[in-house]
Image (spheres, grey):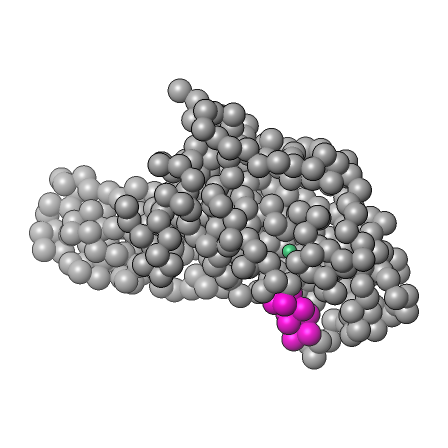
């Protein structure tokens, strides 16, 4: 049994099963975030998606993604450079154009066309300030983040962070209302108010939709002051858009109409690692001097979640009724969102593994 070098935890314990779960394998047909757009400049950038080594580059103005391993000697193309609209391998100078075709073999120029060499290409696009890749034809369009270019909002890019969990567990944590009172007592929830009322959940294209309002939250000092609110408890309206499989857009509208937006996109780097890319946007207290306060607030919330979510086993919760699959036990009504989210994931897993 292989151990994870930094934890000593057997992979089998993290998986809860012998092989990669069906849902993991099905995610090849979806867009996933792999880097911030601002990170991808004039050099190739190496990332990992669903365990696949991928190199990103901007070639002739287009975002491109291809297999990171040079087919010649297995070198990492992310160590190379961009020359004449192609990625040049750092080892022997082979060049790969945007369609993955090898267009130069310097040691024998005359063999370049005859050898018909190429590296596999993947679909790639830029949206919401993020580079997205789909390993196979994607089922749904990329998620939207309309506030990114809205001048009414002050928009901040968060630092990407890695959690040792699956992308569905990371996403579910974001929309799991029942944990606010316990994990986030005093920040976004209160132990004094643990009850969770059901919400209506519905689908719009590839988006799971639900709204939540009428929930009293503790008004945190400076935020309340910047909002111009004086009440001890604040009751915002929260509109959620979860683009399947693991991106969430949350728009919070306060009683005075002011808005605060969180956009979080979780990448299944591999079976055991999830990298979250995120933005926050606000249309109150927009002066840059307040940026640190808002970033610190989100960092505190994330620090509260991380050890809890990393403790969950297996990393990929079971979504099917297959023999041996031990389903977790939801609370009717209170877990309405996560029940519907898992129901959809079960459909994705079943469709992705249909013969
Ligand atoms: Fe949380």
Q: Main secondary structure of the magenta part?
A: helix
- Residue 298: say if magenta: yes
Residue 59 on image: x %, y %: 37, 54
Residue with the most extreme bottom position: 289
Q: Quadrant of ligand 1?
A: bottom right
Q: Residue at x 35, y 56 (%)?
A: 8
Relative to 324, residue 66 above or below: below
- The answer, for residue 84, to whether it is visible in the render is no
Left or right placement of residue 248 versus residue 35 in this view: right
Relative to 85, residue 232 above or below: below
Residue 99 on image: x %, y %: 33, 43
Left or right placement of residue 323 versus residue 217 in this view: left
Place residue 323 in its image quadrant.
Answer: top left
Residue with the most extreme right position: 231
Residue 346 on image: x %, y %: 54, 30
Q: Which residues are magenta?
A: 292-300
């Amino acid at each position: 049994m292989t151990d994870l070098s930094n934890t000593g935890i057997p992979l089998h314990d993290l998986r809860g099963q012998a092989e990669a779960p069906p849902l993991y394998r099905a995610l090849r047909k979806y867009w996933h975030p792999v880097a911030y757009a601002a990170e991808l400049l004039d050099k190739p950038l190496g990332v990992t998606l669903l365990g696949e080594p991928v190199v990103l580059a901007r070639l002739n103005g287009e975002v491109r993604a291809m297999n990171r391993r040079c087919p010649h000697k297995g070198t990492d193309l992310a160590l190379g450079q961009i020359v004449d609209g192609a990625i040049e391998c750092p080892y022997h100078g082979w060049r790969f154009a945007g369609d993955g075709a090898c267009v130069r073999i310097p040691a024998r120029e005359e063999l370049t066309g005859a050898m018909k060499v190429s590296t596999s290409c993947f679909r790639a696009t830029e949206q919401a300030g993020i580079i997205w890749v789909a390993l196979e034809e994607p089922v749904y369009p990329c998620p939207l983040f309309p506030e990114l270019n809205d001048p009414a909002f002050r928009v901040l890019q968060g630092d990407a962070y890695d959690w040792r969990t699956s992308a569905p567990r990371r996403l579910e944590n974001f929309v799991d209302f029942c944990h606010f009172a316990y994990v986030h007592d005093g920040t976004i929830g209160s132990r004094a108010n643990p009850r969770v009322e059901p919400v209506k959940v519905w689908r719009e294209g590839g988006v799971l939709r639900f709204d939540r309002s009428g929930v009293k939250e503790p008004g945190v000092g400076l935020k309340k002051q910047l909002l111009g609110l004086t009440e001890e408890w604040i009751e915002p309206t929260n509109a959620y858009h979860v683009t399947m499989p693991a991106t969430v857009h949350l728009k919070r509208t306060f009683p005075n109409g002011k808005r605060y937006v969180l956009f979080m996109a979780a990448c299944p780097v591999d079976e055991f690692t999830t990298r979250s890319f995120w933005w926050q946007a606000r249309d109150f207290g927009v002066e840059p001097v307040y940026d640190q306060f808002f970033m610190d607030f989100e960092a505190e919330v994330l620090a509260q979640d991380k050890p809890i979510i990393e403790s969950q086993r297996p990393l990929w919760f079971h979504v099917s009724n297959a023999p041996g699959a031990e389903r977790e036990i939801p609370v009717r009504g209170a877990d309405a969102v996560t029940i519907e989210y898992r129901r959809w994931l079960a459909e994705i897993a079943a469709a992705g593994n249909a013969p």
